[in-house]
Image: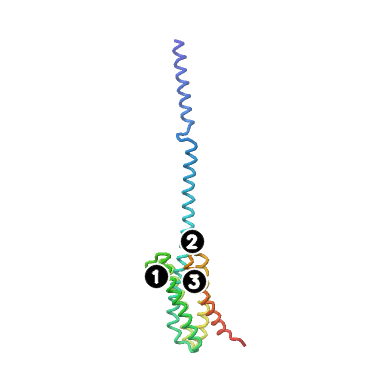
Amino acid sequence: MANDIEYLNQIAQDNRAISKKADSGFPIEPKWLKIIGAAILGVIVIMIIGSILGGLGNAERDTLDRIYARTRNLNESISEYDEKVKSSELRSMGNSLAAVLTETNSKVGNLLTSEFGADGAEPRDENITTEEANHIQEVNSNLNYGRINGLMDRYFVREMSREIVLLMTLETDAISETNKASVKEALSSSWNNLSKLSAQFNSYANPAD
């Protein structure tokens, strides 16, 4: 009888030892856990980098979209009001600005297609379209005020001077956001031409004594 009890106790102890060993061990070897952990971390890092790069790409595309809309809208405004300007010199400056805007608009439109796969002339972001429509509406409202009150030349100089500077700022932003040589080349050329026109409008508004 004693032998039977000892035998049963031994079996119970063995079972507890086996159960404890099974509970305390990992079903996967530690080295594989390290490999799996590293793989998961790698995927997370790639996702983060992709998200950052995607955001930068969107910012670049959005700025070019805005430049495209801005140059088109401003060109239409010049076409409407330039002929109402009294000064022949100022009309000539307006024509020169229109030429730069036309060239810039064409180049940016081509870049949006070739570099970003744009499938239409309108910006992809409806907010940009709306904001630019509101922007040019304000410009036209000011020009129309000048026309009604016999101050067309003064208001034309003021509005165009401001718009040139704002457009140059957009182009500076786009140049800083891109790593594409084609974008840098096109916008740098436009920026240089706008800079010369900005000096002309400034000189006209502030003639030397």
How far across and down, in percent of the image, does residue 47 sit? Answer: 46, 52
Secondary structure beneath dot 1 equals: loop
How far across and down, in percent of the image, does residue 126 sit? Answer: 41, 67
Secondary structure beneath dot 2 equals: helix
Q: Residue furthest top?
A: 1
Residue type highlighted by circle 1: Glu
For label 2, the residue is: 56
**How far separated are the C-alphas under marks 3 and 1?**
19 Å
How far across and down, in percent of the image, does residue 131 sit? Answer: 45, 71
**How far separated are the C-alphas under marks 3 and 2?**
18 Å
Residue type highlighted by circle 2: Leu
Give the quadrant of the C terminus: bottom right
How far across and down, in percent of the image, does residue 174 sit? Answer: 50, 67
Check residue 76 in the rendering and tell me which mark sits there, or answer none: none
For label 3, the residue is: 187
User: Which class describes the residues within 10 Å of circle 1: few (<14), some (14-19), or many (20+)?
Assistant: some
For label 1, the residue is: 122
User: Which class describes the residues within 10 Å of circle 2: few (<14), some (14-19), or many (20+)?
Assistant: some
Of discs 3 and 1, which sits in the foreground? 3
Q: Earlier in the sequence, mark 2 or mark 1?
A: 2
Q: Residue furthest right?
A: 209
Vertical comparison of 67 with 4: above or below: below
